[in-house]
Image (cartoon, rainbow, N blue to C red):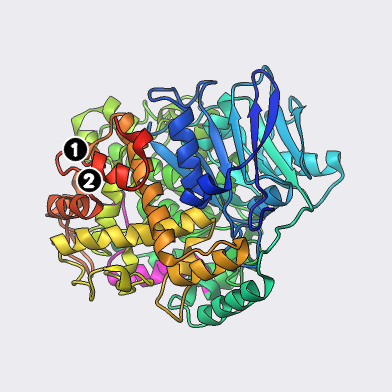
């Protein structure tokens, strides 16, 4: 009997059209708990190094965890795990909504997709039955059109659909997979991977539910979680959505602006969350089972940037299409968010790629001859919107920008590389490593998928938020040193920050709910109570931390096998330069190597290579990853 899990893994080969259903091994699954942890095991063992992410041989894993689809307040998540065509690294792209729970209700914890269909197809999964269906009539449609068409054809308004738009079909390297219309598995190019396989969508629905081993204990644990979350330290997230961070971050000098040249935007009030919520907000939206409801539907009723209702924009999107590009028209930002959602684009990579070419234009590295006549001066909102359309179709200059910042900079030369803000090819998100948090500077450098603010967690919780998230009793250095400090203590602390965040990744939870302290968030200790009652296993917080460490190390091994080592754990040049103005004037990153040394040592990794040692892998039962 399976509790907390569906207990099954689905394999689909689009080339041969083979469909296979396998029973999961409980003992093996427990080592990784689930979601991206177990997906890391699958991809490491089944996908050899050097495979082209856009080839038929590459594999994609849709993954859920034990809390996915349960009453756990954070249980609306699923993750897509794959090798990124943008970076060549491990990548996982999380999304909320209801797709993950519906996949589990359909009878599967994991879906492995490989091969390439001869013509466009979609995968239909319903209560344990699986079909590969023709999608030729869907090819060329955007995400909204695809979703509406499938709901009509299947005559089932309860289905959940994860689909790519034209960006994925055309192979834009930062194309997203969109589910539930406005939710994005955004970063790293999963949309391009789907497009390379001629896979337009995955459609799921089911009614199998999730069995709970100890219902009374589970109910008590959930009640405790809901009570604790009433004391959540970031109440602005449920109240105002993530866009509430725009004004706050600007006031502190931690709002990335002008392609990260500075961290303060004089016109920030024009693109603030207050303006969005007052003038453009339609209603709030929550993921499955979540009491935060941090999502927002917005619309622009008329004018040159008129936009129908769509979910978003989130904080990251507002910053990337607003301050990063010096655009002060919030209606243009809302329009940009809408286009990215319906065409299937990662808003972070799209916005920063546009900010990068705007700076190249300013510096004379690009001219109107290069840009197909687009005037890419800072703040040109109309040119920004036109460029998004060109990126999607890869028309002219759009094909150049569709490569992402790293490839563009390499082609434009050394002066462009000096202003290219990426790590391992992944564009830097909207958190400032010079002034917001030095721990997030370290996270940008070392996370498996490149510059990342959310996988495994928002590292700023430590020195910016002053929150230990339940890890103090396991050895996390406490209290935190001031934000400017770049000491070995910060490096050691990140071990605990990362493993705490990785727990959410493996149980299948939204990371937002784990930020706080005992009594104000879902700590590792409380997740252990929840998972124990759910599965019937006697899971401790220590076991969750060990499983998280196993997952974190295996993702590092995946990248090591692809040739990524300490030499790649570095930051863009801009972050070693002082912020020129605003409240955080003078801040910069100076001692990354000091924090790296301490972090590698705390993790049990070799300082010279930055890779897990044989001893560490044996300790974790990952002997198969020793090479």
| Residue 226 sits above or below residue 624 on the image | below
From the viewer's perspective, tell me whether residue 250 is left or right of residue 289. Answer: left
On the image, the x and y values in percent for residue 579 come to 19, 59
Please identify the quarter of the rendering in which residue 211 is found.
Answer: bottom right
Q: Which residues are magenta?
A: 240-260
Which of these two is toward me, 626 or 199? 626
Asked which secondary structure carries label 2, the reply is loop
On the image, the x and y values in percent for residue 244 come to 46, 70
Asked which secondary structure carries label 1, the reply is loop
Number of marks in picture: 2
Which of these two is toward me, 423 or 334? 423
On the image, the x and y values in percent for residue 186 come to 51, 45
Residue 326 appears anywhere in the view: no
Residue 202 appears anywhere in the view: yes
Q: Mark 2 = which residue?
A: 605
Q: Residue at x 52, y 78 (%)?
A: 229
Is the C terminus in the top left, top right, bottom left or bottom right quadrant?
A: top left
Q: Find out whether the residues at labels 1 and 2 contact each other: C-beta distance under 8 Å.
A: yes
Q: Residue at x 66, y 38 (%)?
A: 142
Please identify the quarter of the rendering in which residue 24 is found.
Answer: top right
Task: Determine crowd level at label 1: few under 14, some 14-19, many 20+ residues with C-alpha closer than 10 A.
Answer: some
Determine if the magenta segment contains residue 248: yes
Label annotation for residue 609: 1
Determine if the magenta segment contains residue 384: no
**Cα distance in 3D space between marks 1 and 2:** 8 Å
């Amino acid at each position: 009997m399976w509790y907390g899990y569906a207990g099954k893994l689905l394999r689909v080969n689009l080339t041969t059209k083979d469909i296979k259903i396998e029973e999961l091994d409980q003992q093996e699954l427990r080592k990784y708990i689930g979601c991206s942890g177990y997906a890391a095991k699958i991809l490491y063992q089944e996908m050899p190094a050097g495979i082209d992410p856009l080839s038929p041989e590459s594999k994609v894993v849709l993954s859920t965890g034990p809390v996915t689809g349960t009453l756990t307040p954070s249980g609306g998540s699923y993750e897509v795990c794959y090798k990124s065509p943008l970076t060549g690294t491990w990548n996982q792209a999380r999304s909320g909504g209801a797709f993950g729970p519906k996949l589990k209700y359909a009878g599967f914890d994991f879906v492995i997709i490989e091969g390439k269909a001869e013509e466009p197809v979609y995968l239909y999964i319903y209560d344990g039955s699986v079909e590969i269906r023709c999608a030729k009539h869907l090819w060329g449609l955007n995400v909204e059109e695809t979703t509406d068409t499938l709901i009509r054809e299947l005559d089932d308004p309860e289905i959940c659909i994860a689909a790519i738009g034209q960006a994925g079909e055309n192979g834009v390297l930062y194309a997203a997979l969109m589910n539930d219309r406005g939710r994005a598995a955004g970063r790293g190019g999963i949309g391009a991977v789907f497009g390379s396989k001629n896979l337009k969508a995955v459609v799921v629905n089911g009614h199998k539910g999730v069995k709970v081993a100890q219902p009374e204990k589970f109910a008590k644990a959930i009640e405790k979680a809901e009570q604790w979350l009433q004391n959540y330290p970031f109440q602005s997230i449920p109240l105002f959505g993530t866009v509430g961070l725009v004004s706050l971050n600007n006031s502190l000098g931690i709002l990335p602006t002008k392609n990260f040249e500075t961290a303060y935007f004089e016109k920030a009030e024009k693109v603030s969350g207050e303006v969005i919520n007052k003038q453009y907000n339609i209603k709030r939206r929550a993921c499955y089972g979540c009491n935060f409801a941090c999502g927002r539907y917005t619309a622009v009723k008329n004018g040159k940037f008129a936009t129908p209702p769509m979910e978003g924009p989130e904080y990251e999107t507002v910053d990337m299409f607003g301050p990063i590009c010096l655009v002060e028209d919030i209606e243009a930002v809302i329009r940009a968010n809408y286009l990215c959602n319906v065409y299937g684009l990662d808003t972070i990579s799209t916005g920063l790629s546009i900010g990068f070419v705007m700076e190249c234009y300013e510096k004379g590295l690009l001219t109107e001859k290069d840009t197909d006549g687009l005037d890419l001066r800072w703040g040109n909102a109309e040119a920004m919107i036109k460029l998004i359309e060109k990126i999607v179709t890869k028309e002219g200059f759009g094909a150049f920008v569709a490569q992402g910042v790293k490839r563009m900079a390499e082609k434009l030369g050394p002066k462009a590389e000096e202003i290219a803000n990426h790590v391992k090819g992944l564009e830097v998100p909207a958190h400032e490593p010079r002034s917001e948090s030095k721990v997030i500077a370290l996270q940008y450098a070392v996370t498996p998928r490149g510059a990342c603010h959310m996988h495994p967690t928002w590292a700023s919780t430590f020195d910016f938020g002053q929150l230990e998230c339940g890890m103090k009793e396991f050895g996390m250095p406490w209290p935190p040193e001031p934000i400017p400090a770049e000491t070995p203590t910060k490096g050691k602390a990140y071990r605990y920050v990362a493993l705490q965040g990785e727990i959410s990744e493996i149980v299948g939870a939204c990371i937002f709910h784990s930020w706080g302290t005992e009594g104000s968030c879902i700590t590792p200790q409380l997740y252990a109570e929840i998972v124990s009652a759910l599965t019937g296993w006697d899971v401790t917080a220590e076991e969750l931390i060990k499983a998280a460490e196993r997952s974190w190390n295996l993702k590092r091994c995946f990248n090591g096998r692809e040739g990524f080592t300490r030499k790649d754990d570095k930051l863009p040049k801009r972050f070693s330069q002082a912020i020129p103005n605003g409240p955080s004037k003078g801040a910069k990153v100076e001692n990354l190597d000091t924090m790296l040394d301490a972090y590698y040592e705390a993790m049990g990794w070799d300082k010279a290579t930055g890779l897990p040692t044989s001893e560490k892998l044996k300790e974790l039962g990952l002997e198969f990853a020793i090479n």
